[in-house]
Amino acid sequence: MNIAKIVREAREQSRLTTLDFATSIFDEFIELHGDRSFRDDGAVVGGIGWLGEQAVTVVGIQKGKSLQDNLKRNFGQPHPEGYRKALRLMKQAEKFGRPVVTFINTAGAYPGVGAEERGQGEAIARNLMEMSDLKVPIIAIIIGEGGSGGALALAVADRVWMLENSIYAILSPEGFASILWKDGSRAMEAAELMKITSHELLEMEIVDKVISETGLSSKELIQKVKGEIQTELTRLAQLPLEQLLENRYQRFRKY
């Protein structure tokens, strides 16, 4: 396994984004905006679409595919209003009995002064708390980078999946190396120690499924993800609510 290659793949600007998946998998997808408190955060997108006969709430972190788009999306680093928008949409889903699907691709929550002033830590913590008890099925899919609490804020789910060439970690390999050795250039050495790849995390039961990307076109990968979501939402819908919530609770308590 070439860890450097996997990290590059996970960060590749041309990777499929949340909106690519949302608009291709879900029919009549309608994007919703704003946290009803401060502003709309372009790094977090969400809305409602149809998967067959089932209405689904879709929430995810959006990176750009060009410099201009990345500036608009803050390079996929959400502010607290992004997480509050996500929570608003998830609570709306709970109210109307819609399952939730999240797509995650972020190096982490934005660490700027303004974000901290507006309660970045509280916004992430509230998402963790509310998602743990959200009374509808939740599937979370890491489609690129899954960085720190910024990713976990959308990943307290009944099923957590990763695309094959994605990564999921408490912080970036560069950050880990800078803390451990005071040398960010040892990032790939740190990545080896951190166990951040999809297959390593599946083996440790941190994630529930790895979706293979090998040999698939973007269109084929989208169709594969769509099929997996349809199958799993059907399974989760058959569980009594109390059992769904207890299973979710136990899933995260075991860590």
Image (spheres, grey):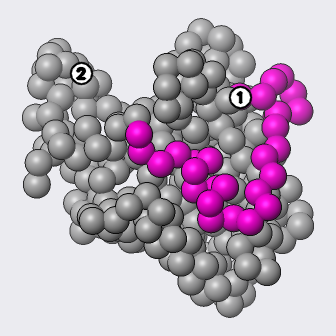
**Badge 2 amino acid:** Ile
Seen at 64% across and 85% down, the residue is: 234
Label 2 sits on residue: 179
Q: Where is residue 136 in the image (x, y as percent from the top left)?
A: 74, 70
Q: Which residue lies furthest to the top in this view?
A: 113
Quarter holding the N terminus is bottom left
Question: Residue 31 magenta-drawn?
Answer: yes
Q: Quadrant of residue 248?
A: bottom right
Seen at 68% across and 29% down, the residue is: 42
Left/right placement of residue 17 relative to residue 52 reads left
Q: Position of residue 40 (x, y in %)?
A: 78, 28
Q: Quadrant of residue 153?
A: top right
Q: Position of residue 150 (x, y in %)?
A: 52, 37
Seen at 87% across and 27% down, the residue is: 37
Label 1 sits on residue: 41
Seen at 81% across and 24% down, the residue is: 39
**Badge 1 amino acid:** Asp
Q: Are marks 2 and 1 in contact (CB under 8 Å)?
A: no
Identify the magenta region: 14-41
Q: Nearer the viewer, residue 221 or 87?
A: 221
Q: Position of residue 198 (x, y in %)?
A: 29, 58
Q: Residues within 10 Å of mark 2 (few under 14, many from 20)?
A: few
Left/right placement of residue 191 relative to residue 241 reads left
Q: Earlier in the sequence, mark 2 or mark 1?
A: 1
Q: Give the SS element for disc 1.
A: loop
